[in-house]
Amino acid sequence: MKKKEIHLSFINYEIVIINNGILTDAQMIKLESYLPTIFLKKTKNNSILVSSIYLHKTEHIREYKWTKKMIHGGEEEYRQFIDYYEDDNNIYYKYPTMLGIADKKNKKIDFFIQEPDLLSLRFFIKSFILEFLYSKNWFPCHGAAIVYNNKAYLIAGQKGDGKTTLLLALGLSNDDISILANDMLLINNNVNDAAVVCSGDTNIRITKESINLIKKSFGSKIDEYFSNETTILKNGKFLVNLRNFQKVELDDMYKINGIIICNKKKNELCQIKIPEYIYKDNTLEHPIWINLFNTNNLKENVNTFLKKQIQTINLIKTPELNTIVNYTVKGLKKYDEDN
């Protein structure tokens, strides 16, 4: 029997992907593995169906009066141009071998597929999910997070600055620190008059070099989180599910109490502040271009709110991971007592 559906849920919202015979079982399983694992949960009884995405087979891709080209796809090797056209009722997205038609009123999407392009489907569906959450006041941003004393501390930094290394080192070094998120955060700036965060994905991608660096400081304890089922990606990174590190409920929301900045180039953990780059809401990987939802001015609202609510923590400048972790833990304890 073919795998016919993929259910994605977050809080009490649900999105369902329906396969009308175009994808094989293996392709559906692979597509599911590409999607943010935090959303691959059992649907709640009181869930609200946000959208259905239907996948159909077609022999020909219909042409429209394309008005603009959109780019998405994350890293350069995955980027592609998508033709875009909109009328009163629908929005049309043309890929090389697929055509997406979104019904603006019903928020229903039909994909007509000549040849399945799972990566393109993954980027579209992921962006679609994030854009919907954005419209519900959940802001997606690039970063990691830990939980200490039931409050969240974000770990921000540019790609390659050592967020994952610091995240795992903190989680392994202290039983009072729990790992919440590695790469994608969902922030809501107005839950009971506080800014809260929850995990936007549960996959960790980490290099062998980072694992060895953590082992150097904290021994082989990290090995227990990696099993024979750990996936090794084409770029040599290890892929492991964050639930292997679970001490807290990943689906829960936590009040944001501070932000830690990683800066690999300067070999330092510097003052905690609000970096603008974690609020880029139109990145190539997760662009806000689907246009089915009213996203308002959420970026500015979140940024302004966090700047008012979150104070700074000064931490030591050093290239040594063990020293960084020790001073981070001391800083967290002091900051938690003062706030």
Image (spheres, rainbow, N blue to C red):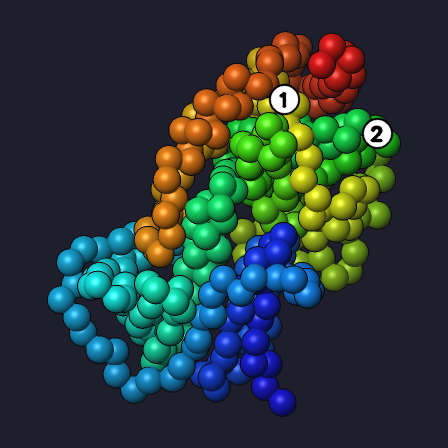
Q: Residue drawn at (63%, 44%), measured in percent from left and top?
A: 199
Specify which label sits upstream in the sequence, 2 or 1: 2
Instruction: Point out which mark residue 43 bears.
Output: none
Q: Residues within 10 Å of mark 1 (few under 14, many from 20)?
A: many
Q: Secondary structure at mark 1?
A: strand
Q: Label 2: which residue?
A: 176
**Residue 269 placed where, x, y %?**
61, 18
Q: Residue drawn at (84%, 48%), measured in percent from left and top?
A: 224
Q: Which kind of residue does numbered mark 2 sit on?
A: Asp
When the figure is inspected, residue 209 is found, relative to residue 6, above or below; the finding is above
Q: Residue drawn at (27%, 57%), measured in percent from left and top?
A: 81
104 on left or right of 247: left
Q: Secondary structure at mark 2?
A: loop
Residue 10, quarter of the rendered image: bottom right
Q: Which kind of residue does numbered mark 1 sit on?
A: Gly
The answer, for residue 244, to whether it is visible in the render is yes
Q: Residue drawn at (22%, 78%), measured in percent from left and top?
A: 62
The answer, for residue 167, to whether it is visible in the render is no
**Residue 211 placed where, x, y %?**
71, 39
Q: Residues within 10 Å of mark 2 (few under 14, many from 20)?
A: some
327 on left or right of 119: right
Q: Label 1: which residue?
A: 258
Q: Are marks 2 and 1 in contact (CB under 8 Å)?
A: no
151 on left or right of 34: right
**Residue 189 placed where, x, y %?**
54, 32
